[in-house]
Amino acid sequence: MQRPNPGRRFFLKAAGVSLALPALESVPKVVGAASVAAKQLSGTRRMVCVGNMLGFVPATFFPEQTGSNYTLPQVLKPLTSHQKDLSIISGLDHGVKGGHFAIHAFLSGVRSVDAKSMPEANITIDQRAAESIGGLTRFPSLTIGSEDGIHGGCQMCWTRSGTRIPPITGPKDLFRKLFVNEDEKDRLRSADQVELNSSILDAVRGDAKSLEKRLNPRDRQKLDEYFTSVRNVEMQLQLNKKWTNVLKPAPGMDEPENDEMVSDLPELYDLIALALQTDSTRIATLEIAGGFNSQALGFKKDYHALSHHGQVQESIDALIAIETYQTEQFARFLDKLKSIEVDESTLFDQTMVLLGSGMGNANSHTNTQLPVILAGGPFKHGQHLAFDPKSKTRPPLTNLFVSMLQQFGVETDAFATSTGTLRGLESKS
């Protein structure tokens, strides 16, 4: 009698329920709610990452002074009231090239074309953090942005399998995802799907166990890892089942309409704040893409054309106005987070908020010296943390992501091209 081929058999069975084989390192390990809670440093941790597809004019973004005694430059003036609660970081990047074709590496440090050579592909910081959440919130993460504009629209968030996460494209769509419940028929269909997957997993586990005595020690170890994967997926299914029957929270606001990114931006920020406040998610990203309609602010040229200003002052002035509008809305978002009290604290104190871009200077198509601001969360702020871009000991920007992940509660010492945590950035505790 011919013995079955364990590798092939496991693959065929596992593929039907989207369960990884033990040999596959690309599938994240699901972490249960209990272990997530145990990892939290103190209180709830949240993370918001905001990306600008076309960067900022460097001369109006980076302060001339370093340390704590610095003057906010023109584009960052709207952040004056938050100056002590944020860190401006200059001189860092990911060491990649490609202009517009490399900006998607902002939150990963890895271009998509280089993903296969990396242990975790080009997974972005938001998705790495979301893996530690499991089913603790209804949405492990929210990805928001425009699909309009140059080079395919929003490309800021990627999974560890190298797959782009399509964004929620407007406030109406985001509102419905957060607050509009499925009808009873849809909920029953979701519950049936959960039950179906659970029964299939039981069948896969039983089938695999029947092969255990035929395996050599090395394959037996792989099988043990496989069982661990099965248990983790079953845990995730139980968490999914919980959310199937839990009604979504009341929003406390009317459903908005989708317009265009300029006028939608305040509403998108408000909805992100609501999502955090209701604990619908603890991780959100927002990308302001090339489809940002500069005409809505009174300019004839589109945003992308203005970013390639060619040192024409009129275009630079228009670009500064657009970027200032964006930082005004970012400042308004920080105000909102500070105004919301949660667990004897505020959302701002519990939330790390990153603002930046994968583009250093759109006019010259460079991906060096990226603009970065980190606000809120458990860090000591109030500084311009400057690094010499010519120094051979300069850390990569991914070191900042290691620091953020650790403060989020993820037990890791590495992320993508990192060499450690970011020196000069200290936690409050």
Image: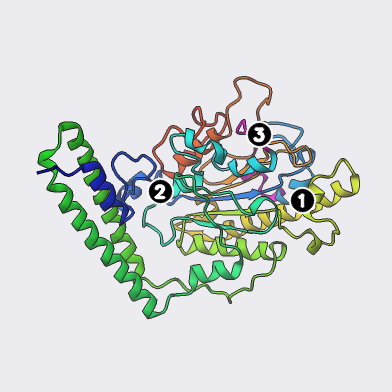
Label 2 is placed on what type of residue?
Glu
Q: How far is mark 1 from mark 2, CA to CA?
A: 34 Å
- Identify which residue, 21 or 119, lies in the foreground: 21
- Identify which residue, 175 or 118, lies in the foreground: 118
Q: Do tag 1 and tag 2 residues touch (Cβ < 8 Å)? A: no
Q: Do tag 3 and tag 1 residues touch (Cβ < 8 Å)? A: no
Q: Residue at x 56, y 62 (%)?
A: 168
Residue 227: image location, x then y, percent: 21, 46
Residue 252: image location, x then y, percent: 54, 74
Q: Residue at x 43, y 71 (%)?
A: 248
Q: Which residues are magenta?
A: 80-98
**Which residue is at the far front?**
1
Which tag, 1 or 2, sits closer to the chain's start?
Answer: 2
Q: Secondary structure at mark 2?
A: helix
Q: Residue at x 37, y 80 (%)?
A: 184
**Which residue is at the far bottom?**
184
Identify residue for label 3: 97
Residue 400: image location, x then y, percent: 55, 36
Q: Is residue 292 above or below residue 403?
A: below
Label 1 is placed on what type of residue?
His
Identify residue for label 1: 304
- Let me know if residue 360 is in the magenta part: no
Label 3 is placed on what type of residue?
Lys
Q: Does 335 sit left or right of 193 as displayed?
A: right
Q: Secondary structure at mark 3?
A: loop
Q: How far is mark 3 from mark 2, CA to CA?
A: 29 Å
